[in-house]
Image (tube, rainbow, N blue to C red):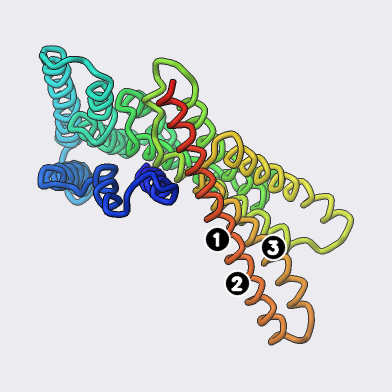
Amino acid sequence: MMTQKRSHIWQWFVDDKIEPSNVKAAMLVAYPHPNAKNWQLLIANILLYLGVLLLSAGVIFFMAFNWDSLSHLNKFVIVEAIFALFIGGFYLINHAQKKHHSQSNLPSTHNQNSQHNQNIYGWSLPNAMLVGASITLGALLALVGQTYQTGADPWQLFAIWAVVILPFAYIAGFDLLWLLVAILINVSLGLYLQSFASVFSFLLEDIQQIAIFGLANLAIHLIFTLAKRCQWRGQLRFNCPMVEATSLFASVSGFTWLIIWVIFDFNYSYDSGEHVIYYALLYLVTMASLFVWYRYRSPALYPLTLVLTSVSAAMVSLLSRSLFDTSDTIGALFIMGMVVVGLTSGCLYWLKQLQKEFAQTAMLNSEEAAHE
C-alpha cells in the first residue's frame, strides 16, 4: 500500500499535477512518519506477544524439567490453569472491548469500522490470549499423550493440535494463529510420511513426497486466497497475508525442488522418462497457472517473483546438467555465470516495468472510483 501511494504521487509529479516544492509534503501526507504513539503501540505489541510466547514456552519447559518430581494431578492442574487463564482473559478483554465500542458516542463511519475490525482481527490483546491458549493446548495434548500413552505416533499430536485450534484461529482471524495451523499441518504430514515410510515405500518415493508437500501448501494458499475474495461473513477472518505469502513460498520451493530433482534424475530411458514426465507437467501447469492468475486476474509482484525465480532455477539446472557433461568445466562455469546474470537482470527489469504498470492501473482505478 505504501509503495502504491508513493507511485501515485510520483506519477502525478511527472504529469505536472504536483509542484516540485509540494512533493515532499504529499509524500508525508500519504505515509506520515510514525509518531510517539505509534512507536509505543508497536513496542507494546512486541512485548505483549513476546511475553505470551515466553510464558507458554516456560510452562512446557517447566513440565519437562520437573517431570519426575511432579505428580500427574499437579501436571494437569498447572497446564489447565494456564489454559483457563488465557481463555478467561480472552473472554473478559474481548467483552470489554465490544462493550466499549457499542457504547461509544462517536459516529459509525467507514474508517472507524475499519479500525474496529483491525483491532478485532489484528495484533490485539484478545488475540494474544488466544495465541497463548493455542500453545498451552498443545502442551496439554502432549501431556495427555505422555501420561496415558494415547498417541502411538508423533504425527497424531500435531494433527490433533492443528484441528483443535482451528476454532481459535477462525475466531481471531489472526495471521499468527493461522500460520501456526499451517505449520502444524506441514509437520504432521511430514511425520506421517516418515512414520509409514516402510508401508508407503512401494507407493510414495521421495520425489512424490516432495510433490505432496508442494500441493498441500498450494491448497492452503488457495483456501486463504479464495476465502478472502469471496463475499461472506467470514471474509475478514481469512485476510491473512502472512499465511498466503508463507504457504506460497513453501509451495513454490517444493515444486522447484521437484523439477530440479526431475532434471538431474532423468536418464533418458523409456521407463524413467515416462515416470518423471508427469512431475514435469505438474510443475509446468502449476507455474503457468500461478503466473496467469497473478499477472492478469489478481496482479501481484511477490507471487510473480517466486515464479520467475523458480523457472530461472529450473533453466539453470537444465543448462548445468548439459554443460557439466562436457570436459570443459571452466567454460561451463563461465557460461553458467553469464546465464545467471542475464536471467537475474532480465527478471528484475521486467518486474520493475510490471510494478509501474500495476501502479498506473491502481491509480486509474482510484480515479474512476473517485469520479463515481
Seen at 49% across and 45% down, the residue is: 191
Question: In this view of the protein, which residue sits in the foreground, 225 or 105?
Answer: 105
Seen at 62% across and 55% down, the residue is: 256
Q: Earlier in the sequence, mark 3 or mark 1?
A: 3
For the residue marked with disc 1, what is the amino acid?
A: Leu
Q: What residue is pinned by disc 1?
A: 348
Q: Residue 184: x percent and y percent?
A: 42, 40
Q: Residue 135: x percent and y percent?
A: 27, 38
Instruction: Give neighbour class at mark 1: few <14, some 14-19, many 20+ (Cα, 10 Å).
Output: some
Residue 106, quarter of the rendered image: top left
Q: What residue is pinned by disc 2?
A: 341
Residue 249 in view of the camera:
no
Question: In this view of the protein, which residue sits in the foreground, 92 or 335?
Answer: 335
Question: In this view of the protein, which residue sits in the foreground, 252 or 57?
Answer: 252
Gap between marks 2 and 3 measured at Cα: 13 Å
Residue 101, quarter of the rendered image: top left
The mark tally for this picture is 3
For the residue marked with disc 3, what is the amino acid?
A: Met
Residue 181 in view of the camera:
yes
Gap between marks 3 and 1 measured at Cα: 16 Å
Seen at 11% across and 45% down, the residue is: 40
Q: What residue is pinned by disc 3?
A: 315
Give the foreground label among 3 and 1.
1
Seen at 57% across and 40% down, the residue is: 294
In this rendering, position of residue 88 left or right of residue 170: left
